[in-house]
Amino acid sequence: MSGLYMLDYGAGNVRSLVNAVEKLGYNITFVKDPSDLKKAEKLIFPGVGAFGHAMDALQAKGYVEPLKEYIASGKPYMGICVGMQTMFEGSEESRSKGLGIIPGVVKHFSSADKAVPHMGWNAAQVVKEQTEVDGQAVNYGINKDNVYYFVHSYAVPYTEALKDWTLATTQYGNEIFVSAVQKGNVFCTQFHPEKSGYAGIKLLRSFLQGTGIVDDSKIKIHDPLPSSKDLFTKRIIACLDVRANDNGDLVVTKGDQYDVREKTEDGGDVRNLGKPVELAKRYFEEGADEIAFLNITSFRNCPMQDLPMLEVLRRTSETVFVPLTIGGGIRDVTDPDGKVHSALDVAGEYFRSGADKVSIGSDAVYAAEKYYANDCIPDGTTAIENIAKAYGAQAVVISVDPKRVYVKDPSETTHHVIETPYPGPNGEKYCWYQCTVKGGREGRDLDVHQLVTACQKLGAGEILLNCMDKDGTNSGYDIELIKDVKSAITIPVVASSGAGNPQHFEQVFKETNVESALAAGIFHRREVPIEDVKAHVKKSGVLVRGVDA
Ligand code: 1PR
């Protein structure tokens, strides 16, 4: 279709959306100049990042008035995430004014009863039912049997005043917010269709194939009913530790307590469990809710030259339509020729290649140390702060590599200690969790409690909580560690390390209030398929996303 345009202001990953549109057989042209908006016949605005950043960029580039004119022209318009939020009058996130096309203000979620950001798969209840529509799927294909991928800290609370506009609502904790709007030629979603698996692809197809214009006289409006519990699902994440093997090939590997070499007398080869792009595609098709790549030898290389990982992301985002996280080497780097790249530039390169989130390991530990040395005052210089400011908190994950340090008595250390039913080698009944850097090779004088609380203050949006003692053991997650971390912060936590069977996932979801659980070895070695994990967890009463096709 000619005339399909995308408005991008360079704030994050739009590659996945382009890939999804192209997969559906359409070509899309980027708006490069305000005059392009006059040429557009259909327009998609995939807002990513922060509201103020989006509106300021639209203002600076002279897009605000031409965009309003385009929307008023009656030609089909689709806004996604911040692209939907900008339709409102303003946001608590920023002083910048919105487009003001829909009445109302975007508000911050309360973290009193839930983790914020709202990050994961949730249902969308259609409240404005189309009874008859020419040429396009009813309700753009939004359907109560599906869940969609959300990632945001701000949303528009549903009120009667918005009845006219609201196509679907979603409940998160006790809050009901507008998750899709539609009126005439305008269709916007708070969730990301391009990250919502096949359910999202179908929705995009509906917008692209249809007229994109709905006759508002042919609709029936229902009231959204708050239920006692939201339909937010727990995420199952597949993690791929990637590194070059001794022949220089990029492989997915997996360690036992971070040792990735085969146990042979001559030191052993790096374990090779497959190719990153192929494995990621397999996990997407098997129902993984998210894929994480960790470039585990990043500290020995320069990531800006680490083109293979950028290429891995580019190729993965062509076939994988769930969120992608990349970790390893997110820090300031200097090229061999002396050119300096900030962590923000490094992250930007990954976002443009298809990543939705970056995960920071070693550099987060140094940032936390700096935060405490500065009397707990963020100084605005860390990678966490800079990336969160430009791309939003939801794009910044902290990968934590802790290990247990046993003590006989809490008085032996100043660190945050827990009493453990699993005593240490000399019968010690207490332990603290020491943070490490450089892939677990160097322990620091910082405990996990200190790290996660500092990172949340600095603006991180999620914690990927590994555990060196549990990694690769198949003995289950470190429940004590996870509970302890969850109690310290309000951002979502990914439980990682030790999954050996589906019961371990059930256990971590039932015994802790963690939002998601990650595994590597059991999936790579095909010991347990993702479908089996999901079927088991679902049967035990925990909500998970079904495998769609
Ligand atoms: O410090 O910002 O460059 O990031 C380096 C990243 O690489 C960190 O996220 C760190 O966790 C990771 N990393 C470094 N060395 C290793 C290693 O294994 N030698 N991998 C490593 C960490 C742990 C998990 C693993 C789970 C689940 N891997 O990601 O996938 O423990 O495994 P399991 O289900 O098989 O038990 P920076």
Image: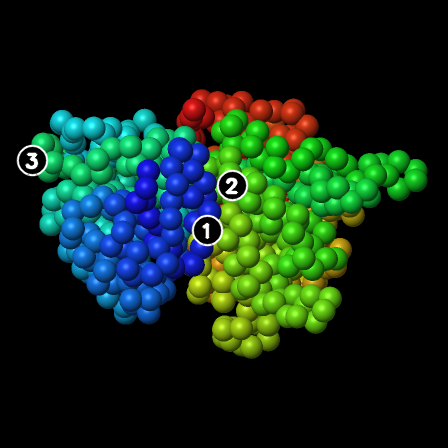
Work out how far the residue at label 3 is from the one at label 2, CA to CA, in angstroms.
39 Å
Answer with left or right where residue 254 lies relative to residue 93.
right
Count of numbered circles in the view: 3
Foreground residue among 502 and 157: 157
Is tag 1's residue or tag 3's residue first in the polypeptide sequence?
A: 1
Q: Which residue is mark 1?
A: 13
What x and y, as percent, mark residue 439? Answer: 71, 53
Residue furthest to the left: 217
Name above or below for residue 333 compared with residue 203.
below
Name which residue type carries label 1: Asn
Q: Residue at x 33, y 69 (%)?
A: 60
What x and y, as percent, mark residue 21? Answer: 39, 39
Name above or below for residue 172 compared with residue 94.
above
Answer with left or right where residue 170 lies relative to residue 394.
left
Name which residue type carries label 3: Ser
Q: Quadrant of residue 204?
A: top left
Residue 190 in view here: no
What x and y, as percent, mark residue 387? Answer: 49, 63
Task: State the SS at label 2.
Answer: helix
Answer with left or right where residue 403 lies relative to residue 68.
right
Work out how far the residue at label 1 is from the one at label 3, CA to CA, in angstroms.
37 Å
Location of the N terminus (image quadrant): top left
Q: Which residue is mark 3?
A: 217
Is tag 3's residue or tag 2's residue first in the polypeptide sequence?
A: 3
Q: Are marks 2 and 1 in contact (CB under 8 Å)?
A: yes
Q: Residue at x 82, y 36 (%)?
A: 262
State how the image is colored: rainbow
Tag of residue 317: 2
Name which residue type carries label 2: Ser
